[in-house]
Amino acid sequence: LAQKWLMQAQVSPQAWQFCWILLSPDKVPEIQYFGASALHTKISRYWSDIPTDQYESLKSQLFSQIACFSSGSKMVLTRLCVALASLALNTMPEAWPGAVAEMVRVFQEEGGGVDGRARCLALLELLTVLPEEFQTSRLPQYRKGQVRGALAQEWGSVCPLLQQLLRRTDSPGAVKARVLRCLSSWVQLDVPLSESEGLVHDCFGALPDPELFDTAVEAIVNAISQPDSQRYVHYSTAHTCTNSAYLCSKCCYDLTTFQCMWLMQALGFLLSALPVEDILRNLHSLITPYIQQLEKLADETPNPANKLAIIHILGLLSNLFTTLDISKQDDESADGTAPPAEKPPPTPGPNPVVVVLQQVFALIQKVLSKWLNDSQVVEAVCAIFEKSVKTLLHEFGPMVSQLSEMLGQMYSTIPQASALDLTRQMVHIFASEVDHFPPIKALFELVTSVTLSIFQQGPRDHPDIVDSFMQLQAQALKRKPDLFLSESLDVKAVFHCGILSLKFPEAPTVKSTCLFFTELLPHCSDVPPVARVMQEDGKLLIQAVLEGIGGGASRSLMDQFAEVLFSLNKHCFSLLAVWLKEVLQPPGFPSSRVSAEQKENFSQQILRERVNKRRVKDIVKEFTLLCRGLHGTEYAADY
């Protein structure tokens, strides 16, 4: 009740008055934080309540409060900065032109009693949260375009400030770290690389500092990988790319494993910008030393030392192939509306990554033959192909057949979750392609058959496999439900595996299983085997779902159970009405705390809601609180 009252108070008209009182210096930080949060909520969600003539007053008060808290509680300061950022977004560019320039000017002026370092950090915090608040704001679409344009113009005020702070030798490490985070935030607004080039060079200068390394690398990657940076030809950068392979191969020996992985990703982006004919040559010169080392390790007797070396080399290749994508050279679309698997087929010609993978495929098989019992090595091998598939999409096609065969052999020998995850990616990309459907179908049926045997032996020892298996089945139903028409696939057994998986204690496994059922149920009308199993055993599904709602599963899973009920109501309405009546009839099920009247009320509410999924989720949440004896308690007030 207290939580509910606080939430109501936060959105009430009186919040405009009491939020300033809660920010008083004599209050504890938790109360001050609530006041700042109330302020942000009112500005971001109830902007229309503010009269135009009060904009300036509100802005001045926020500037004043931020100055006061610049040396105080960090969490309150951040919340106040977010509130001012929200105000700026709602007033740009008409009511507050040059908002960022004014922010910089205000904080650069001498502030009474506030030291310069604190003012500087407060300004950087404000500039960092401004683009982040824009990304999550509730502005109408037409306003988002206007505000994005205004923010792009404000970069001219931000860039010189960041450069000045980053280049000063006396700038504290905390200030430089905040500058790098601010840069990462702003480049997400598609700042052209030509306008941030100087700052990116300064980021390279920060790499030798261990405390700044991770933040600097993140800023560099964000700056050079955002779409707008690909539009500009920069010959000096292209020249640098040609030498990067040699330079980085030398530097890698002095770096930690984590730093090597980051550099490999950066190299992938750089290689992607080269002409296609140059990529393969540079790629070979970069990875040849690692391939030679891997060949040597593959001939050695397995031991802990060479295991770590093998995983390291495979990890380097995975990170390189994650970002090496030549399709970006021709991709001028920035709307990002099409699903990745729906991109048009690539232009003819072998992809450099595919060429390399085909060349080292036999070597990878050799490594697997000796390390098949080691889940970490198998996971590292699967990661190479999984990341390549995600990046290359249809261009990975030439390897589908041989990879499907290898995956089948791997999983038949020793089932591991990483092999199922890779199979899921293969199904997602290639199951709908006529040329690749036969090997994908054979692989899907094989891993399904092997996993069903695991369920017969006892699946509780393999929650990771069960989780990945349910995700695979859901993906198959989503991308190619024809896979469930095969006589070789025991749909009934898969259904019963799903029933067992709903009762697992691991929340991720239950979520994946609920996803499987929400994908399965819509196919009752067009996939006969699915229709048959629902007719015969659908009652078991509703029973398992109600057991979870009744207290057998974590309350965090109630939304997923609600989605299964909603799908049942939508696609099996007549059967659901019968099943609910039968399953809820026994006393004490799904909980001894609910009466027959409450169960009947729940059943009728569910059956009435066939359109509003949000309402079904609310009904399920209320019923699970009744089943657990928590309804109306303070403990459940925030649920």
Image (spheres, rainbow, N blue to C red):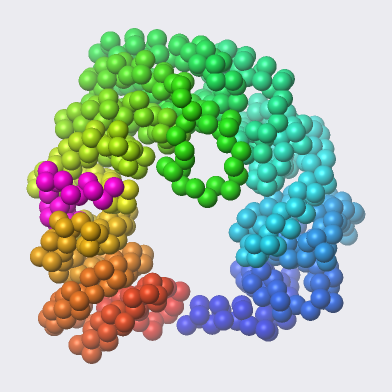
Range of residues picked out in magenta:
480-498
The percent coordinates of residue 524 (x first, y second) are 21, 62
Report whether 456 appears left or right of 542.
left
The percent coordinates of residue 106 (x first, y second) are 86, 56
The percent coordinates of residue 587 (x first, y second) are 13, 83
Camera sees residue 505: no
- From the viewer's perspective, is residue 27 above or below residue 427? below
Residue 551, image quadrant: bottom left
373 vs 416, nearest the viewer:
416
Q: Which residue is located at x 83 percent, y 40 percent? A: 160
Check residue 22 for magenta coloring: no
367 vs 137, nearest the viewer:
137
Check residue 483 for magenta coloring: yes
Most prominent secondary structure in the magenta stretch?
helix
- From the viewer's perspective, is residue 544 above or below residue 161? below
130 vs 336, nearest the viewer:
336
Residue at the limit of the structure toward the right, as seen here: 110
Q: Which residue is located at x 57 percent, y 12 percent? A: 246
- From the viewer's perspective, is residue 374 above or below residue 431? above
Report whether 194 appears left or right of 542.
right
Residue 358, image quadrant: top left
Residue at the limit of the structure toward the bottom, as seen here: 597
